């Protein structure tokens, strides 16, 4: 009877480290994707809320305070701008993590095809 599996060699530890690194880049890929979508939506929501508040104030009094209206609209635009800045930074992180993830994935496939796991069939 032979041993069913040979002990891990250096390629096994290399394979494991590469898989671990690839998984970290996979998660950074998804997190940056979420960060590209959510902050602009929050910024647009804040902008809509401040615009509604500004125009409600004008509607209640019947007369508008241009300075107050401009201040409220400006606050909303700042929220949108911050959301877009975060989104642009996340876009850069998204592209970098996607490229690195695909490179790690390709290297992992090459390593698996060059050095398949050493398995010895069990014979009685």
Image (cartoon, rainbow, N blue to C red):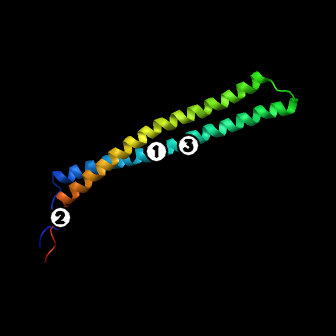
The mark lying in front, picked from 1 and 2, is 1
- Indicate whether 13 appears above or below 88: below
Mark positioned earlier in the residue sequence (3 or 2): 2
Q: Is residue 96 left or right of residue 104?
A: right
Mark 3–mark 2 Cα distance, whole angstroms, equals 48 Å
Mark positioned earlier in the residue sequence (3 or 1): 1
- Indicate whether 108 appears above or below 42: below
* Residue drawn at point x = 71 percent, y = 28 percent: 72
* Residue drawn at point x = 82 percent, y = 26 percent: 64
Mark 1–mark 2 Cα distance, whole angstroms, equals 38 Å
- Indicate whether 115 appears above or below 93: below
Q: Position of residue 8 (x, y in %)?
A: 18, 56
Mark positioned earlier in the residue sequence (1 or 2): 2
Mark 3–mark 1 Cα distance, whole angstroms, equals 11 Å
Q: Position of residue 117 (x, y in %)?
A: 19, 61
Q: Disc 1 on helix, strand or loop?
A: helix
Mark 2 crowdedness (10 Å alpha carbons): few <14, some 14-19, many ≥20? few
Residue at numbered disc 3: 38
Residue at numbered disc 1: 31
Q: Nearer the viewer, residue 6 or 111?
A: 111
């Amino acid at each position: 009877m032979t041993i069913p599996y040979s002990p891990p060699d250096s390629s096994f530890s290399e394979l494991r480290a590469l898989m671990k690194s690839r998984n970290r880049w996979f998660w950074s890929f998804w997190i940056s994707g979420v960060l590209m979508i959510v902050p602009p939506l929050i910024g647009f929501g804040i902008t809509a809320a401040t615009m509604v508040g500004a125009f409600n104030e004008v509607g209640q009094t019947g007369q508008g305070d241009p300075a107050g209206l401009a201040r409220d609209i400006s606050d909303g635009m700042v929220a949108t701008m911050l959301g877009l800045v975060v989104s642009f930074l996340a876009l850069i992180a998204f592209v970098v993590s996607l490229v690195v993830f695909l490179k790690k994935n390709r290297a992992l496939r090459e390593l698996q095809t060059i050095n398949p796991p050493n398995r010895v069939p069990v014979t009685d």
